[in-house]
Amino acid sequence: MTQPDSATRPDTATCLADRAVLRIAGEDVRGFLQGLVTADTALLAPGAPAWAALLSPQGKVLFDFILWADGADVLVDVEATQAEALAKRLTLYRLRRAITIAPDPLHVHWSPTGTEGSPDPRLPALGHRWLAPADAAAGDASPAWHAHRLSLGVTEGVAELGNGETLWLECNARELNGVSFTKGCYVGQENTARMHHRSKVNRRLVVAPFTEPSSRTRVTYPDLALMIDHRRTDALGDALIPTWLAPALEADDPPKA
């Protein structure tokens, strides 16, 4: 992987301790992933990672992650608590292919500003990230990343997206470059494509000010005075609507004449 020179790295913490890296290596790794995940793996290139998900056959998200090209291999930047489960799930699809799926010692790093690494594939405002060995002098940037991401209305991980509970387009995957509609079949593609072509998403995951949790609340963050709700698009209430999401919500529920 291309790594930022140490002289250009920020002095502040960069390592995301709550992320892990898996390496997928062997025979036609991209072809293997192409029939499984939501991103077009043919487009992976150095400096051009992709946000993607592995879905259930019903089109509901099981795991979300960022894919990185590393020569013929693909590296998977995933929530640390889900890395082992994702590796096991991918292994089930491997069958007799000569492919290995194993933890990699690289760490995920992030900077909100600067030119280190690559822009986050979801949204440039999320900052830059890169994969590199751990820096013993750097602390954990996870709390800063978490607050920054939520301030931009971006959800990720099993606590927020759920495990087989939320349709991928309800996670704002279309707006955040997390799905290809031209790559062909993958697990969960049929329902995802049908929802896309109907041009309507009835529910969305949104960041909202922290109040009394309800049945639609996924997780609360009292320290940030925020929570994640799964709300109907015609009843978003006090949800924080970022500029990148507003046009899609208007398309979902256009103003009544």
Image (spheres, rainbow, N blue to C red):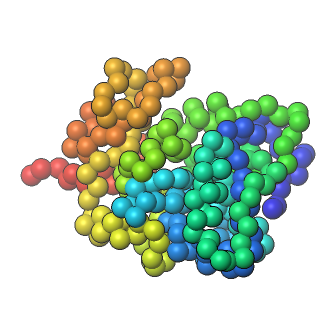
Residue at 51% across / 43% down in the picture? 158
- Quadrant containing the N terminus in the rendered view: bottom right
Vertically, is 72 above or below 121? below
**Image coordinates for residue 145, horizontal then vertical, percent:** 63, 37
Quarter of image, res 121: bottom right
- Horizontally, residue 104 falls left or right of residue 87, namely right
**Image coordinates for residue 44, horizontal then vertical, percent:** 65, 70
Residue at 71% across / 40% down in the picture? 16
Q: Is residue 202 visible?
A: yes
**Image coordinates for residue 126, horizontal then vertical, percent:** 59, 46
**Image coordinates for residue 193, horizontal then vertical, percent:** 35, 69
Q: Is residue 127 visible?
A: no
Vertically, is 28 above or below 219? below
Furthest residue in direction left, as rendered: 257
Which of 9 and 93 lies nearest the eye of the viewer? 93
Q: How many marks?
A: 0
Which of 52 and 35 lies nearest the eye of the viewer? 35
Residue at 40% across / 35% down in the picture? 218
Vertically, is 195 above or below 19? below
Vertically, is 253 above or below 180? above
Residue at 39% across / 26% down in the picture? 209
Which of 205 and 89 lies nearest the eye of the viewer? 89
Which of 99 and 39 lies nearest the eye of the viewer? 99
